Image: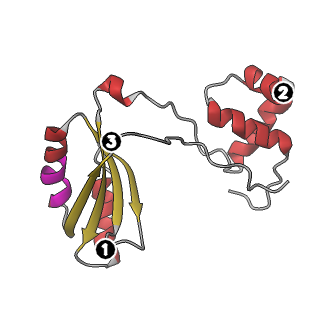
C-alpha cells in the first residue's frame, strides 16, 4: 500500500457505494457517484492498487446453510511466547468454523474467536475435538450470540480528511 493517498469526495462516494454493494457493475457504480464509466473504473483501480480496497466478497445468509449457532470464545494460552502464539494461529486458521480470530489485550484471554456451527452438538465437537487440543490452550470461555443487533463489514468513512 502506498502512502500519501489523496482521497477526494468521488473516491469516498465510490467507497460508500461499494461497501453497500460490492457487486455493482462499473456502469451502475458510475451512475450512483456521478461519474462516467471510464473515470469511475480508473478510480476503482487506483483504490485497489493503493490498498484502499482490499477485496470484494459475497456475504452468504448463514441460516440458509443451517449455520444457526454463533459463539464468541475467549482463549487463554499457557505460555506467552512467540512460537506458541504462531502455532495456535497457524492451526486455528485451518478451522472452517472460525470466522474471526483476534489477538487481544485488556482481557483475561489472549485470543477472541467467533465461530459458526449448525448446533450445540457441532459446537461441542469443535471445542473439545479441535480447539482445546491445540498445544498451549489453557482455558476457553464461551458466550453464545442470541441476536445480532449490528452486523456490518462497512467501515466508517467520516474520518477521512479531504
Dot 1 surroundings within 10 Å: few (below 14), some, or many (20 or more)?
few
In this view of the protein, which residue sits in the foreground, 47 or 107?
107
- Residue 115: x and y in percent read 31, 46
Task: Indicate the colouring scheme.
Answer: secondary structure
Q: Which residue is mark 2?
A: 38
Give the spatial CA distance, label 2 vs label 1: 49 Å
Q: Is residue 15 left or right of residue 66?
A: right
Tell me which corner region of the image, top left, top right, bottom left or bottom right, holds residue 14: top right
Magenta part of the protein: which range?
A: 126-132
Residue depicted at x 81% and y 31%:
40
Viewer-nearest of discs 3 and 1: 3
Tell me which corner region of the image, top left, top right, bottom left or bottom right, holds residue 123: top left
First along the sequence among labels 2 and 3: 2
As drawn, 134 above or below 130: below
Q: Which residue is mark 1?
A: 83
Residue depicted at x 50% and y 42%:
150
Say if the magenta span includes residue 82.
no
- Residue 101: x and y in percent read 38, 55
As drawn, 76 above or below 40: below
Report helix, strand or loop for mark 2.
Answer: helix
Q: Which residue is mark 3?
A: 146
Per the rendering, the mark at residue 37 is none
First along the sequence among labels 2 and 1: 2
Amino acid at each position: 500500500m502506498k502512502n500519501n493517498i489523496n482521497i477526494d469526495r468521488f473516491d469516498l462516494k465510490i467507497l460508500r457505494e461499494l461497501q453497500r454493494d460490492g457487486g455493482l457493475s462499473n456502469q451502475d457504480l458510475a451512475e450512483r457517484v456521478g461519474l462516467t464509466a471510464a473515470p469511475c473504473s480508473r478510480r476503482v483501480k487506483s483504490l485497489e492498487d493503493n490498498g484502499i480496497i482490499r477485496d470484494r466478497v459475497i456475504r452468504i445468509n448463514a441460516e440458509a446453510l443451517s449455520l444457526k449457532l454463533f459463539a464468541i470464545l475467549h482463549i487463554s494460552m499457557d505460555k506467552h511466547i512467540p512460537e506458541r502464539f504462531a502455532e495456535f494461529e497457524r492451526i486455528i486458521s485451518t478451522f472452517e468454523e472460525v470466522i474471526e480470530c483476534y489477538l487481544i489485550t485488556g482481557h483475561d484471554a489472549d485470543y477472541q474467536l467467533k465461530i459458526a456451527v449448525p448446533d450445540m452438538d457441532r459446537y461441542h465437537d469443535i471445542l473439545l475435538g479441535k480447539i482445546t487440543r491445540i498445544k498451549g490452550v489453557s482455558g476457553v470461555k464461551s458466550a453464545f450470540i442470541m441476536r445480532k443487533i449490528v452486523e456490518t463489514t462497512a467501515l466508517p468513512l467520516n474520518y477521512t480528511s479531504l
